[in-house]
Image (tube, rainbow, N blue to C red):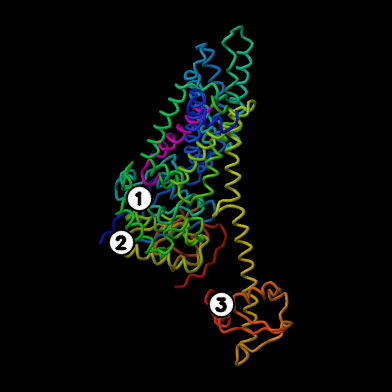
Amino acid sequence: MEQKIAIKVDDLTVAYNYKPVLWDIDLMVPEGVLMAIVGPNGAGKSTLIKAILGIIKPIAGSVTIYDKPYNKQRKLVAYVPQKGSVDWDFPTTAVDVVMMGTYGKLGWIKRPGQKEKKAALEALEKVGMLAFKNRQISQLSGGQQQRVFLARALVQNAAIYFMDEPFQGVDATTEIAIINILKELRKAGKTVVVVHHDLQTVPEYFDWVTFLNVKKIATGPVKEIFNDDNLTKTYGINYKVAVNK
Amino acid sequence: MNITEYFELLFTDYTLRTITLGTAVLGAICGMLGSFAVLRKQSLLGDAISHAALPGIAIAFLITGTKDSNILLLGALISGLVGTFWIRGMITKTHLKSDTALGLVLSLFFGFGMLLLTFIQKQPNANQAGLDKYLFGQAATLVESDVRLMVIVTGIALFIMLLFWKEFKLLLFDADYTKTLGFNTKLIDVLITFFIVLAIVLGLQTVGVVLMSAMLLAPAAAARQWTNNLGTMVFLAAIFGAFSGVVGTAVSASQNNLSTGPVIVLIAAVFVLFSFIFSPGRGLLFREIRFRQNRRDLHLKKTLQFMYGIAKTHENSSHPHAIRILNNFHGFTKGTLRKLEEKEWIEISGQQWSLTSEGFTEARDLYNQQKKDE
């Protein structure tokens, strides 16, 4: 059966002050894969996600989600930003943050009600954080904050999930909890794109991978393209990684 | 006039009532909108905007020649907005960091404003005196129409805030995410900033260019200490601001030589100081108390645990042991021993101690709990 293309990126180029951060990226992500974006620091991994989501304006290029421009398909897309991108001392609670995931569907002015609250609590339960629902967010551990962010994206009930380093600075328990949720999402036919740093876990966690270093080096199934050759091309040094085949 | 006389007069004297109402409303709107500025980490934006408003006042006077405060404040609003857009422009279009942009706009506009003020003062125009009241503010010049304007603007700001509460909160917490949800973040941002500028401009006549940012920040900073809920914070900040205004006016009216603006700001600062020390959740005092309590508890538990280790080796857990075998290293002091006795976890007779059965259970649970935590 021909697989549907969930995300299609054409000629995407992003530059900060004349220096290209992403150069002419073409990318096709089939529906239902769990994809890692790997590459060295400064390779533009986060930028790629942000440019796809329209947070950063690219100089050139276009993004389509299920064959339509991203702008028209926003409600199909959920985003988990880097944990460090917000101030966790903000005066609000865990359930309140998760509820923000419902704001997009609500649109302007309309307030969240019981239905939205119920969805938020369900999402908190999925990530094992229900007991912390009324906790002030600064009093959560790093791993718990990451789970709250994940729950906020789950509440959006999207078809495609973008996550920026969800495993950064979390303990082993949280990492396992998160990856189990990601695998569940894939099982439900969702597409998940994750900026990932730990090369060791790529074959175990993901089935699709994109190598990125300003340019796109390679993209495809982990089984076929996650090899020393591509790693060396991406990281610039002779990279040997223990890939268990 | 003393304070009690003042409060008696408040209900009969028209001028006093106008001024008090004006400073109260001003304090409320500043506290409300200041909360947003503080949470966006744009505390200094208020300072830059208020200074940027000065040339607007001078230019409005030069063009119209009137001292009508509404027209002068319109000038202030325009130049305040121009200053704000310059700051934004500098941050997005150049490599300058926001503190540099703020500092540049602040001093540039303020310098230009001062230049115009001195120029106006040298003009042979009797109407000129009084413009410098916008530097340090002069609450006594408030008239009913000024206060009416303040009330109307505060009402509109409140309405807009309640209407877009969800959007404001979202943008304050996570701007990038707001964008991905399909909201026009620029519009929300412009709304928030516009009302902050408006609040500042309204306060210029009362508090003045130089101290205005304190009106914006102090109530919000104080309010943050008392709550972890955004709504409560905004509400408290409005209350603190209004209260600073009323008390400040009362103090300055009852002491002849104190000008109102600085007194209001000082009262607001007292709120901040009090909140920093005495708020239960985040205050310094309670944090220190909690810290000491924890340390004491830890000492106690450490000693108890050590005793448990010794008592465990005996068939009879209440077998007495010499106090001498405990030492400082195990968290033992005379005080902890007495506390343990008070809790009836141990019994002391002469130079000997023995665990009671409660003490034994307590220590055992402590031990198990610790193992579980590991």
The circle drawn on residue B68 is none
**Residue A199 drawn in magenta:** no
- Magenta stretch, residue numbers: B179-203
Left or right of B293, for residue B350? right
Vertical placement of residue A225 versus A23, above or below = below
**Residue B253 lies in quadrant:** top right
Whether B193 is among the magenta residues is yes
Q: CA distance from mark 3 to mark 2?
A: 48 Å
Evaluate whether label 3 is on the same chain as label 2: no
User: Which secondary structure lies at badge 2?
Assistant: loop
Sequence-earlier tag: 1 or 2: 1
Marks 3, 2: nearer the viewer: 3
Judged by its main secondary structure, the magenta piece is: helix
Provide the residue designation for mark 2: A189
- Circle number at residue A8: 1
Chain that bears disc 1: A
x%, y% of residue B83?
Answer: 53, 28
- SS at mark 3 in the image: helix
Q: Is residue B163 left or right of residue B295?
A: left
Rendered position, A232 above or below B148: below
Residue B59 on image: x %, y %: 54, 16
What is the CA distance from the residue labelled 1 to the residue labelled 2?
17 Å
Q: Are marks 3 and 2 in contact (CB under 8 Å)?
A: no
Q: Nearer the viewer, residue A20 or B16?
A: B16
Callout 2 amino acid? Gly
> In the image, which disc is placed on residue B366?
3
